[in-house]
Amino acid sequence: MRKIKDFPEHKLIFLGDYIHDNGKHLVDVLDTFMALEKPAIFLKGNHEEEFLNFYSKFGTDKIKRGKILNYFGIGLDHVDWLKNNLVYYYYNDTAYFSHAGIDDSKSLEEQTEYDLIYSAFRENLDHVDDKLIFVQGHIPFHSVRYIGNHWFIDTGCGLGGHLSALVYPELKIISSNN
């Protein structure tokens, strides 16, 4: 996060999966997001979707909900923030950002929430739109990679890897391991 301060004019877009199985730093991550002074876009990943669905199953059962919060080490303020600040995608005239990419057999307008958080397409996407670049997380690789206009920037931070970012539109890669 310190390295992105070199780009104060850029919008921050986070690609999801803030909640992880071994997310011992979850409260720190969410507190950092909640304290950001700079406007940012926070995309929903499949982990947040699954957490919020699981949490909501217990309705008004304060004991069970409390156990869930205790297990993850977060408070109600964090759950409220997750409910109110996550979106499925962000796009502009030149780029499309989503947690898991898209279903390449559909137009952008036809993408479902499921497609945007669970897709696993790993190829070039110029057949969907050759004027856009597509940026996603979801599938961890050892380093940032791209295939044509499709960028994969998940480098496994939640799995013991490192945190990576793509400075756009410059297409400059920033990583916590260098």
Image (cartoon, rainbow, N blue to C red):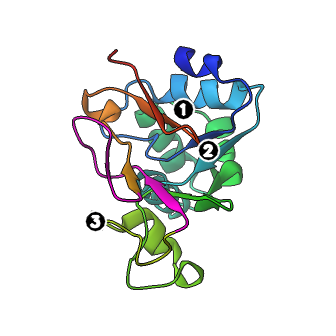
Left-right relation of 133 to 105: right
Name the residue furthest left.
142
Q: Position of residue 66 (x, y in %)?
A: 53, 41
Instruction: Give the residue at x 34% y 15%.
Output: 178
**Closer to the camera: disc 1 or disc 3?**
3
Density class for disc 2 (Cα within 10 Å; few <14, some 14-19, many ≥20) is some
Q: Nearer the viewer, residue 114 or 83?
A: 114
**What secondary structure is found at the residue carrying circle 1?**
loop
- Tell me where residue 27 appears, x and y as whole percent: 52, 27
Instruction: Give the vertical position of 139 relative to 71 (above or below).
Output: below
Magenta region, main secondary structure = loop
Queried whether the magenta region covers residue 144, the answer comes back as yes
**Sequence-wise first label, 2 or 1:** 1
Q: In this figure, which residue is indicated by the disc labeled 3?
A: 123
Question: What residue is rendered at 68% in x and 37% in y?
Answer: 77
In the image, 164 versus 158, the foreground residue is: 164
Callout 2 amino acid: Val
Q: Dot 2 corresponds to which residue?
A: 79
Residues at badges 2 and 1 in contact (C-beta under 8 Å)?
Answer: yes
Residue 24 is situated, as x and y percent measured from the top left of the image, at: 37, 25
- Three-letter code, disc 3: Glu
**Which amino acid type is marked by label 1?**
Ile
Q: Residues within 10 Å of mark 1 (few under 14, many from 20)?
A: some
Per the image, the residue denoted by label 1 is: 74
**Element on which disc 2 rests:** helix
User: Which residues are the magenta region?
Assistant: 131-149
- Answer yes or no: do the residues labelled 1 and 3 have beta carbons within 8 Å? no
